[in-house]
Image (cartoon, helix red, strand yellow):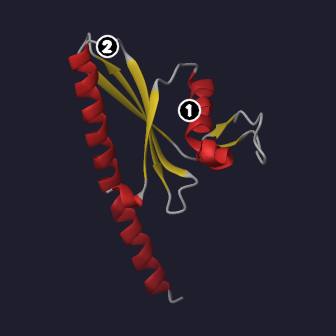
C-alpha cells in the first residue's frame, strides 16, 4: 500500500479519538446525573474505548463521581502501562502485560478482567464500567 494511503488512514483513525473521548464524557455525564439525583455515595466507573476488533482497549479512563462534593474526577491510563493481569480461569493470558491486553485476554469476560486489572493496579473498587466501540457513535 502506498505510503500516502497509509498516512491518510492513520490520520483519519487518529481524528476519531477526540470524538470517542467526547462520547465517553457524555456517557459519563449521564451516569453522574443519575448518581447526583439518587444521592448515592462516591462511585468509580471505568470507561473503555475498544478497537475495531472489540478486543483491546485503546482508551481507558477512570471516573470518580462524588455527589456529596459535586465533583467528577477523570484519569486517563496509558494503554501500554505494564500491569499484573488476573489470569486465573482464562484460556490464554500473559502477566504482566500491557493494560490494553487485559480486556483481550478476558474474551467474553473482557470488561470484567479489565475492571479486576484496574482494581489491582490502583488498589480501589470499581463500581461499574462503560464500553464503547466505533459503532457506538
Asked whether residue 117 is in view, the answer is yes
Total residue callouts: 2
Query: Element at badge 2?
Result: loop
The reply to whether the C-beta atoms of the residues labelled 1 and 2 are less than 8 Å apart is: no
Q: Quadrant of residue 128?
A: top left
Relative vertical location of residue 86 with respect to residue 20 in this rendering, above or below = above
Q: Nearer the viewer, mark 1 or mark 2?
A: 2
Q: Determine crowd level at label 1: few under 14, some 14-19, many 20+ residues with C-alpha closer than 10 A.
A: many
Spot occupied by residue 5 in the image (x, y as percentages of width and height): 44, 84
Q: Quadrant of the C terminus?
A: bottom left
Spot occupied by residue 55 in the image (x, y as percentages of width and height): 58, 54
Q: Residue shown at 58%/38% (left/top)?
A: 114
Q: Residue shown at 52%/19% (left/top)?
A: 125
Q: Quadrant of residue 16?
A: bottom left
Q: Residue shown at 25%/34% (left/top)?
A: 29
Q: Residue at label 2?
A: 40
Residue at the limit of the structure toward the bottom, as seen here: 2
Q: Quadrant of residue 69?
A: top left
Q: Mark 1 or mark 2: which comes first in sequence? A: 2
From the viewer's side, name the closer residue of 38 and 42.
Answer: 38
Spot occupied by residue 25 in the image (x, y as percentages of width and height): 29, 40
Residue 29's label in the rendered image is none
- Alpha carbon separation for disc pair 1 and 2: 21 Å
From the viewer's side, name the closer residue of 134 and 13.
Answer: 134
Residue 113 falls left or right of residue 95 = left
Query: Element at badge 1?
Result: helix
From the viewer's side, name the closer residue of 70 and 134.
Answer: 134
Residue 115's label in the rendered image is 1
Q: Determine crowd level at label 2: few under 14, some 14-19, many 20+ residues with C-alpha closer than 10 A.
A: few
Amino acid at each position: 500500500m502506498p505510503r500516502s494511503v497509509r498516512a491518510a488512514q492513520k490520520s483519519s483513525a487518529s481524528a476519531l479519538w477526540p470524538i470517542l473521548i467526547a462520547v465517553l464524557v457524555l456517557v459519563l455525564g449521564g451516569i453522574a446525573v443519575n448518581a447526583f439525583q439518587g444521592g448515592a455515595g462516591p462511585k468509580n466507573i471505568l470507561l473503555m474505548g475498544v478497537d475495531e476488533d472489540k478486543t483491546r482497549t485503546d482508551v481507558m479512563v477512570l471516573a470518580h463521581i462524588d455527589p456529596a462534593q459535586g465533583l467528577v474526577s477523570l484519569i486517563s491510563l496509558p494503554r501500554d502501562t505494564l500491569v499484573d493481569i488476573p489470569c486465573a480461569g482464562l484460556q490464554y493470558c500473559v502477566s504482566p502485560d500491557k493494560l490494553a491486553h487485559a480486556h483481550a485476554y478476558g474474551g467474553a469476560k473482557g470488561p470484567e478482567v479489565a475492571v479486576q486489572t484496574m482494581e489491582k493496579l490502583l488498589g480501589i473498587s470499581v463500581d461499574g464500567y462503560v464500553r464503547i466501540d466505533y459503532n457506538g457513535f
